[in-house]
Each structure stands twice: as C-alpha cells, then as structure tokens.
Image: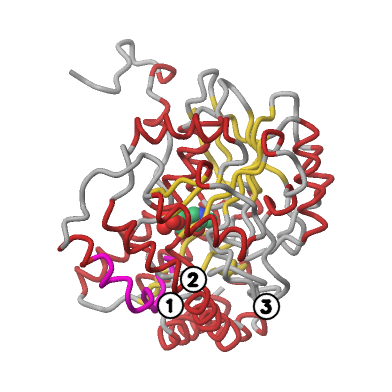
Amino acid sequence: MTVFSGGVGSVDLLPVAATIPSSWLHEVFRAADARERATGHPITRLHVGEPYFGPPEGVAAALAHAVLRGHAGYGPVEGLVALREALVAKLATANGIDSAVSRVFATPGSCQGLLALLLALAEPGAELLLPEMHWPVHLQQALLAGYRPVFYPLGPDHRPDPAVVLAAGTPRTRVLVLNSPANPTGAVLGADDLRILVNGARSRGWQVVSDEAYEDYVYTGEHISPAALERDVPVEERVVHSVFSFSKSLAMTGYRLGYVATATERAARVLGVVQEANIIGPATPVQHAGVAAVALRAEAAAGNRDRVRRNRDTALPALVDAGLLPALPDGGWYAVLDVTCTGLDAEVFTDRLLRHRDIAVVPGTGFALRPDLDAVGAVRSIAPAPWSRHLVRIAMCVAPEALAAGVHGLLEFVDECGRTR
Ligand SMILES: Cc1ncc(COP(=O)(O)O)c(C=O)c1O
C-alpha cells in the first residue's frame, strides 16, 4: 500500500502533514553532524539555540530522586498540582499575570504546548497572523492545526507597527501570534505597542498566542507579558494565552518542559482534551525537576541572561562594524545577519561556510517561508520571501570561545567572498 499516493495521484489528496517541509534548522543540524562524522573536524555550532551553560544545581538531583523514589507514575493531564502552584506564583511575580492552577498546564516543552494551544483554538479555515520573520515551527504548527497563515510586516528594527498588524486581519482571523523577545530577530515589544495589539485583538474577537520562551533574555528595555495587560479584564473575556519554557531561562533544553497559561477556563477545558488525546500527561519525574527549577529560577535566569548579554556585547560588535548586522539585538539568543555583500544566496553561503570553515549557521530564508495552500490547507508550493534571500541567523548562546571563533571565521569568509567576487 502506498500511504501518500492519494489513489489517483492527485496532490490534493495528500494529508496536510505530508506537504509541510522540514525546517532549515533540522537540515543544517543534519548537515553539520554529517560533516563532523565524515571529516572528524569539530563544527562551530552557531545554528542552534543550545546554551553552553546548564540547569541550576539541584535540578538533576530532583529528577534522579523522583525516579529513584518511584515518583514516576502517570500524573494529571494538566501536570502536577505542586508544579502548577509554583508556576502560578512565578507568573504573578515575574510576569504580572494573575493566572490560576486551573488554567496552567505543564507541557513537554513549550513547543508541544504551542501546538496543543493552536489545536485547542483552531476553527476550520481560520486565519492566523504571524510575523513576516518567525520561528519556522510556528508556521509548521499553524499548518498542522489547519490555519491559513497571513504574515504581518515588521519595521527596519524588526518590530511591527501595531496598526499595520491589526489592519492585516480579516473577518476570518482567529489567532494573532506574538513572540517577544523574538526568534530569530531578537526584537522586544514595548508595553505601548502590546497594549494596542492586545486591546485591538480583543475588540476584534481574536485570540492571542504569546510565545515567551525568551522572556528572561532582554538586554535593552524590559520583558512585558501581554497577558499582564489584561489583568483588569474579567477572566472569561480575556484573549491572551501565554506559553513559557524551561529550556531557555533555565537551560533545560533536553528536559522538555514548558507551560501554558490559558486566557480563560473555557480554553483550559478544551486544552485539557487536546492534551489528554496527545500526551496523557507530561513526564512525572521531569515535573519534579521542574518544581526544583522554579524555586531556583530568579537567580539562575539572571545569571544566564548576563552570560548571553556578555557574549552579545563581546562578539557581535565586529559584525555591526562589518555592516552585516544593523544593531545588536535587544533580546533573545540570535542575530540575523545580511550577507548581501558576498553576492551569495543564504543557502549557498551557509553550505560553503560549513564546508570551507566548519561553521554552521542557518539560512534566514527558512524563517520567511510563504506557503501557497490549496482549499484544504495542504501546501501546494512554498518559497521564501524574496527579501530574505541574503539573511542568515547565528546563535549567541554558545560558549564565548566558540562564538568568538565562529564570528571570526565568518568575517574572514565574508571578506574572502568580497575579494573574489
Ligand atoms: C520562539 C521559540 N518558541 C518555543 C521554542 C521551543 O522551546 P522548548 O520546546 O524547548 O520549550 C523555541 C525553541 O527554540 C523557540 O525558539
């Protein structure tokens, strides 16, 4: 049996998931690993958001203790009450969000929480507003959940004009995705812009999905949680659903732990069904590690922010001086470089940088894909927005020496391309 033949060979009959491409992040991941295996050369890995620092001390012990003491059975769909209580307190003090245990879900990574939330909010054929440059997984998830993505433009500083975002909506708009601090651009949205966006979304009957994975990595200004701006709105009229991660703030990438705070009890009930059908519940020992991590959060997150800020301030000014980066990113773990001066398209640049210098970066085109969809939401074709052709993304959360070596090698390579053009 051919699973994806569609019987009559019609592309329209492919399952939607079979038409969604894998992201460039994973392509580069595979290429970097393959090159390291083939050549034995260590690769400078600037392609992936994997921090050089680890979880706070005590987290691994909490995980081990949970397993050794047999705290490893099934738990509630929504997550352990002790963890959700700790998260409600964190949301109140760190984010200004007045959530409740009944509206907080522990999830296996924020990635799964985001998809589950999008599924819980989905309406057939609804439109979802995404920034024109976005984390590729947001687009994959939107398509998997059956949305038709519409892209809102960003200004030269990668921040959207709220009026333009609201104007991009149509009567079919259901969800507005916000991601501040942003991957890949590092843009941080201020309170005034967020207030216009949140109030505008509510008055239009849209839901807001706020991905705050990088909440603790703001170097200029402060992190504002959009849901905090709805504190005075009755709970059942709220529209901001917030998604957070242990991966970035606490460097717990492989633990796979995140959490969602839904805007309303109604949304929480639906999300409960989606999660039951998806995961039954998050891994119990990991949640015990999560309880320990939340207690250590404030100090650990501040230290981690200083580490990445130091990296940014030490290594990235050379990229600004070389004209590849307009300004240091205000937040997040990444910077988007413009390599137009090399005359190379981003994919070619990335490929050659890996082969000639053993440095892995990601083409920016993968953060700006524009799918053409058929009537059922399957991807007929997909191509990058033309303006992304010469952009590449680097990660600045890697070890300082690796970042310095990677930036140095990249600048030498750019110089070489310029001279041989
Ligand atoms: C913007 C954004 N959101 C969410 C995630 C997912 O993080 P996790 O699933 O590890 O919590 C990432 C990971 O890179 C990300 O960049």
Locate residue 129: give its quadrant: top right
Which residue in the structure is indicated by mark 2? 395
**Residue 323: image tag:** 3
Main secondary-structure element of the magenta-colored stretch: loop
Of 412 and 262, the residue lying toward us? 262
Of 324 and 307, the residue lying toward us? 307
Mark 2 lies within 8 Å of ligand 1 (Cβ measured): no
Q: How is the image coloured?
A: secondary structure
Q: Position of residue 371 (x, y in %)?
A: 55, 35
- CA distance separating discs 3 and 2: 18 Å
Q: Is 50 in the magenta?
A: yes
* Amino acid type, callout 3: Gly
Which residue in the structure is indicated by mark 1? 398
Give above or below for 181 relative to 305: above
Circle 2 crowding by C-alpha within 10 Å: few under 14, some 14–19, many from 20: many
Q: Is 217 in the magenta?
A: no
The answer to whether the residue labelled 2 contacts the one labelled 1, judged by CB atoms less than 8 Å apart, is yes
The residue depicted at 48 percent of the width and 47 percent of the height is 137
Circle 3 crowding by C-alpha within 10 Å: few under 14, some 14–19, many from 20: some
The residue depicted at 34 percent of the width and 60 percent of the height is 29
Q: Position of residue 160 (x, y in %)?
A: 75, 53
First reached walking from the N terminus: tag 1 or tag 3? 3
- CA distance separating discs 1 and 3: 22 Å
Circle 1 crowding by C-alpha within 10 Å: few under 14, some 14–19, many from 20: many
* Amino acid type, callout 2: Ala
Region rendered in magenta: 47-63
Is residue 243 visible from the viewing direction of this image? Answer: yes
The residue depicted at 38 percent of the width and 73 percent of the height is 45
Q: Secondary structure at mark 2?
A: strand
Is residue 414 visible from the viewing direction of this image? Answer: no
